[in-house]
Amino acid sequence: MDLNSDLGESFGAWAMGDDATMLEIVTSANVACGFHAGDPNGILTTLRAAAERGVQVGAHVGYRDLAGFGRRNMDVASADLTAEVIYQIGALQGLARAAGTKVSYVKPHGALYNTIAHDMRQAEAVIAALGAVDPSLTLMVLAGSPLEQRARQAGLSVVAEAFADRAYDDGGQLVSRKLPGAVLHDADVVAQRMLRFVREGVIRSINGHDVRVDAQSICVHGDSPGAVEMARQIRALFLREGVSLAAFGAGGAA
């Protein structure tokens, strides 16, 4: 199983998350590209640390919304969205090359991630961006979303993910962050929840029902309170229980 986290999100004097520690735990790093978060020097620092630790790197592309941390819905024209995603991937590819690593996949961030899971107009714009830059890039998507099938139909390699620190509704969708209980904080509960997911393929919904989720990667948000402890406990529990951790597409376990 792959374990990923959103990193490279600090901006100037504004520190976000603990990238250095998280990179000792995860197998894949979704690195900000400067639109929703991150500045060039901080992003480069995170990429260098990922390269040193052999952590796979993905471009965490988002809406151009620093003030809203990319979590505000936006109705971006298709041509603009395609160009902006190309721009972000290209920027991260250049920084990654300088850091001695490469961009292997793309994971949309925040509102863009949630929007394209169901909005096929914006989804097609993102798919077009990957096709234009490098069709071999894997697209990371919300498990069970219409985007998952559409991206595969477009010829992209797709990895679906589950969220360790987010609540699900009975339909297998993420509960809005605006609602109570949407973000989970108890590291022990989160770790046990993910172990059950790996073993049984189900996650308990916010209403107490088991929801089937087919995913190849687990995300712990880097900006969540206690994110490092959650990721650490997931990794420790998995290894104790014989669940190997490896970046998707990699040959060995971490």
Image (cartoon, grey):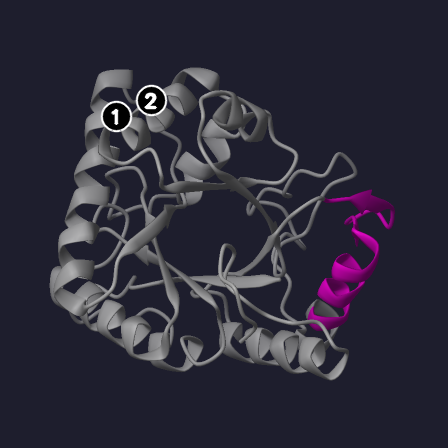
- Residue 133: where, in percent of width, then height? 23, 34
- Residue 17: where, in percent of width, then height? 38, 72
Q: Nearer the viewer, residue 160 or 219?
A: 160
Q: Is residue 146 left or right of residue 42?
A: right
Q: Amino acid at mark 1?
A: Thr
Residue at 17 percent of width and 38 percent of height: 87
Residue sitting farthest toward the front: 251
Q: CA distance from mark 1 to mark 2?
A: 5 Å
Crowd class of label 1 (few under 14; some 14 to 19; many from 20; radius 10 Å): many
Q: Which label's residue is closer to the chain start, 1 or 2?
A: 1
Secondary element type, mark 1 = helix
How many badges with numbers are in the image? 2
Name the residue carrying label 2. Answer: 125
Judge whether 75 appears above or below 100 on screen: above
- Residue 8: where, in percent of width, then height? 29, 64
Q: Which residues are magenta?
A: 191-213
Judge whether 19 appears above or below 109 on screen: below
Q: Amino acid at mark 2?
A: Ala
Residue at 52 percent of width and 64 percent of height: 251
Q: Which mark is residue 82?
A: 1
